[in-house]
């Protein structure tokens, strides 16, 4: 597949050497746990990496990304509805700050900077989704009991509620820059974009716990989602929609109602996803 380069990838950067329990240690620990993209401390030497701030500054890059995705959808489904491609790119991009923030919050009780200048990602060679992510900054927020709380790049907050508020604020600030950059070319309304931002954060917190493969781990992820999204925080569109449901076979499991639509149902022989807002009413 011909993969156009929307802009020149940034040169590799190196993080401040980690001489204690700093953010580099956290990234190393949680990187081994991530099942939704490799996590790095700096941009690897190989090409194909995109700094989030560069992409937001040159939104034409999103057009190239949607074109790559449309080619992939045509290969897979013999169809590539524009709304489907735009929605996939929307959700995949928002997954980057949400996933990084959720992993470090859940496993380390730390919140790194989620500024677009300090996050980068790479696209998969086949399916053009974020395959790797890089945390480029050194600063982090933490609790008073954190072993790295005395480091100069650490900012201490009083408790978990305050740390959750930091994560939420940093994520919303990043998402706001994405909405401004992506809305004009995508033809998706701002309500849809903020709904997708809500889904990405709620999902990422849930999956940070769920990937442990235990009911206790999943429950901890659900609790984090409830902590960070305990109510609606505009412009996010809803509190956490995670809820326990009982299936026809009597099995109980956690599910969530989506706020946004991925438009996968527009693809041949595809139906709405579980929890799609088109078929799953609010209650």
Image (tube, helix red, strand yellow):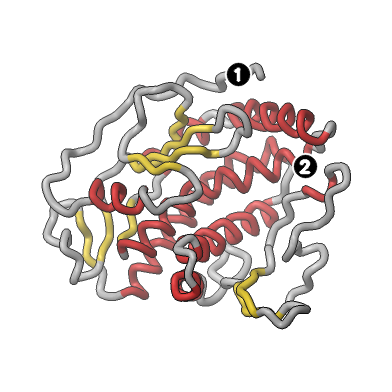
Q: Horizontal and vertical percent for residue 78? A: 84, 31
| Camera-side residue of 122 and 281 | 122
Q: Are marks 2 and 1 in contact (CB under 8 Å)?
A: no
Identify the element where label 2 is drawn.
Answer: helix
Location of mark 1 (residue): 4
Question: Above or below — where is 59 with respect to 134?
Answer: above
- Image quadrant occupied by the N terminus: top right
Among the two numbered marks 2 and 1 on one chain, the one whose residue lies closer to the N terminus? 1
Side (left or right) of 155 relative to 199? left
Question: Above or below — where is 77 with respect to 107?
Answer: above
CA separation, marks 2 and 1?
21 Å
Side (left or right) of 160 relative to 169? left
Q: Residues within 10 Å of mark 1 (few under 14, many from 20)?
A: few
| Camera-side residue of 225 and 189 | 225
Question: Above or below — where is 176 with respect to 66?
Answer: below
Q: Residue at x 76, y 42 (%)?
A: 84
Q: Horizontal and vertical percent for residue 96? A: 49, 46
Side (left or right) of 215 relative to 155? right
Identify the element where label 1 is drawn.
Answer: loop
Q: Residues within 10 Å of mark 2 (few under 14, many from 20)?
A: some
Q: Residue at x 67, y 27 (%)?
A: 68
Side (left or right) of 190 relative to 34? right
Location of mark 2 (residue): 83
| Count of numbered badges drawn on the protein | 2
Q: Horizontal and vertical percent for residue 169? A: 43, 61
Q: Residue at x 76, y 58 (%)?
A: 273
| Camera-side residue of 101 and 175 | 101
- Image quadrant occupied by the C terminus: bottom right
Q: Horizontal and vertical percent for residue 158? A: 25, 74
């Amino acid at each position: 597949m011909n993969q156009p380069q929307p802009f020149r990838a940034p040169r590799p950067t190196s993080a401040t050497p980690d001489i204690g329990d700093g953010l580099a240690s956290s990234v190393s620990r949680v990187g081994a746990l991530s099942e939704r993209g490799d996590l790095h401390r700096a941009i690897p030497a190989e090409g194909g990496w995109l700094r989030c701030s560069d992409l937001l500054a040159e939104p034409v890059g999103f057009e190239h990304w949607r074109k790559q995705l449309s080619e992939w959808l045509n290969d897979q489904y013999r169809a590539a509805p524009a709304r489907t491609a735009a929605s996939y790119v929307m959700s995949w991009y928002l997954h980057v700050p949400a996933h990084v923030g959720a992993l470090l919050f859940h496993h380390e009780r730390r919140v790194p900077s989620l500024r677009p200048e300090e996050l980068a990602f790479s696209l998969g060679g086949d399916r053009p989704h974020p395959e790797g992510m890089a945390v480029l900054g050194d600063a982090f927020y933490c609790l008073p009991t954190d072993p790295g709380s005395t480091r100069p790049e650490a900012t201490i907050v009083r408790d978990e509620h305050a740390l959750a508020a930091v994560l939420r604020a940093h994520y919303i600030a990043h998402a706001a820059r994405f909405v401004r950059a992506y809305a004009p070319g995508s033809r998706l309304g701002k309500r849809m974009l903020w709904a997708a931002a809500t889904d990405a954060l709620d999902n990422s917190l849930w999956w940070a716990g769920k990937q442990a493969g235990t009911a206790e781990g999943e429950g901890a992820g659900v609790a984090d989602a409830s902590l960070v999204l305990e109510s609606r925080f505009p412009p996010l569109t809803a509190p956490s929609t995670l809820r326990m449901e009982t299936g026809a076979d009597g099995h109980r499991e956690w599910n969530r109602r989506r706020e946004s639509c991925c438009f996968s149902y527009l693809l041949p022989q595809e139906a709405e996803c579980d929890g799609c807002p088109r078929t799953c009413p609010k209650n």
